[in-house]
Image: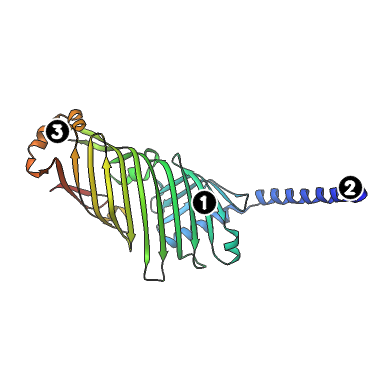
């Protein structure tokens, strides 16, 4: 009995020490230092970007909980490039023991869910690989494009992204993405031929990145008003607005489109020579900040 009582006593002390340690870790956690560390690493990857958060705290199992995390352009912090309501970052302990920086993340942003993986292949994080899966991201809540582009796209976007960066090797930056937009709508900044918006409904896109060039392998639009396909490439620039466009595709207005916008029917009739099997051929050149749309 005395032995059992002694064990219970030591167990009580152990639990007390653990609780006190957790409380001290929680209240004395160097949140500002962690924020600066994340900010410095993001600036290393891209000097034009910075990071800040409303709150950073330790989380169990071994990881960090970030509330109100924001990645922004240092030249113009508003609107932010990305806002996260919450993000849990969990370190992969075995990889850390082996000297590899590797972690998983689980978060929520723009009313959607995000999960991912990041693994650095060197100590300074210059060579790494990453995967990201996101579901039901609400584009209407994403403020960044609205501040940089003329028109607005709404809807919910889901997809998978793989990105690798080998700064020391010949591969450089490369990656691929599969994106899906549901219940989409293109809203024009000012009416075009009396049209305020176009129903996009569903868009399915497959992209590939190689040395700062994004190739669009497949991009299909299926809507109640318009069908279309798009392909080509985007040559990325350090200033996103200046990224060059070289895209071609076809648009096919459907019966619902003519019903909703009868004023456009006569205009399209005058362009019959550009129509083949009900499809209009077009090109998009210029830049992301100032695209130039032209019917072929």
The correct choice, above or below, for 272 with respect to 17 in the image is: above
The correct choice, above or below, for 163 with respect to 194 in the image is: below
The residues bearing labels 2 and 1 have C-alpha atoms spaced at a distance of 43 Å
Q: Which residue is mark 1?
A: 105
Foreground pick, 272 / 292: 272
Residue sticking out furthest to the front = 277
- Asked if residue 238 shows in the view, the reply is no
Local packing at callout 2 (Cα closer than 10 Å; few below 14, some 14-19, many 20+) is: few
Q: Which residue is mark 3?
A: 264
Q: Which x, y percent locates residue 154? A: 33, 38
The residues bearing labels 2 and 3 have C-alpha atoms spaced at a distance of 88 Å
Q: Which residue is mark 2?
A: 5
- Asked if residue 220 shows in the view, the reply is yes
Q: Kindly indicate whether the residue at mark 3 contacts the one at mark 1 (C-beta within 8 angstroms).
A: no
The residues bearing labels 1 and 3 have C-alpha atoms spaced at a distance of 48 Å
Q: Residue at x 37, y 68 (%)?
A: 171
Q: Which x, y percent locates residue 183? A: 33, 36
Element assignment for label 2: helix
Q: Quadrant of residue 47?
A: bottom left
């Amino acid at each position: 009995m005395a032995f059992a009582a002694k064990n219970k006593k030591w167990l009580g002390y152990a639990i007390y020490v653990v609780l006190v340690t957790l409380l001290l870790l929680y209240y004395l956690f160097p949140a500002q230092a962690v924020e600066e560390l994340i900010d410095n690493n993001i600036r290393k990857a891209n000097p034009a970007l910075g990071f800040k958060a409303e709150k950073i705290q330790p989380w169990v199992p071994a990881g960090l909980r970030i509330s109100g995390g924001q990645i922004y352009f240092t030249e113009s912090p508003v609107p932010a490039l990305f806002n996260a309501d919450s993000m849990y970052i969990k370190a992969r302990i075995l990889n850390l023991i082996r000297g590899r920086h590797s972690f998983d993340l689980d978060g929520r942003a723009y009313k959607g869910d995000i999960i991912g993986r990041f693994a650095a292949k060197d100590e300074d994080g210059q060579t790494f690989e990453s995967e990201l899966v996101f579901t039901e991201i609400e584009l209407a809540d994403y403020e960044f494009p609205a501040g940089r582009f003329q028109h607005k796209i709404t809807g919910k976007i889901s997809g998978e992204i793989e990105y690798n960066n080998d700064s020391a090797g010949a591969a450089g930056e490369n990656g691929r993405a599969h994106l899906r937009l549901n219940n989409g709508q293109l809203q024009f900044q000012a009416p075009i031929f009396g049209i305020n918006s176009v129903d996009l409904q569903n868009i399915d896109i497959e992209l590939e990145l190689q040395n700062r060039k994004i190739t669009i392998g497949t991009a299909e639009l299926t809507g109640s008003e318009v069908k279309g396909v798009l392909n080509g490439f985007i040559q990325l620039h350090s200033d996103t607005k200046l990224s060059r466009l070289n895209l071609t595709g076809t648009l096919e207005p459907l019966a619902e489109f003519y019903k909703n916008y009868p004023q456009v029917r006569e205009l399209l009739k005058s362009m019959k020579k550009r129509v083949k099997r009900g499809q209009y051929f077009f090109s998009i050149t210029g830049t992301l900040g100032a695209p130039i749309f032209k019917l072929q």
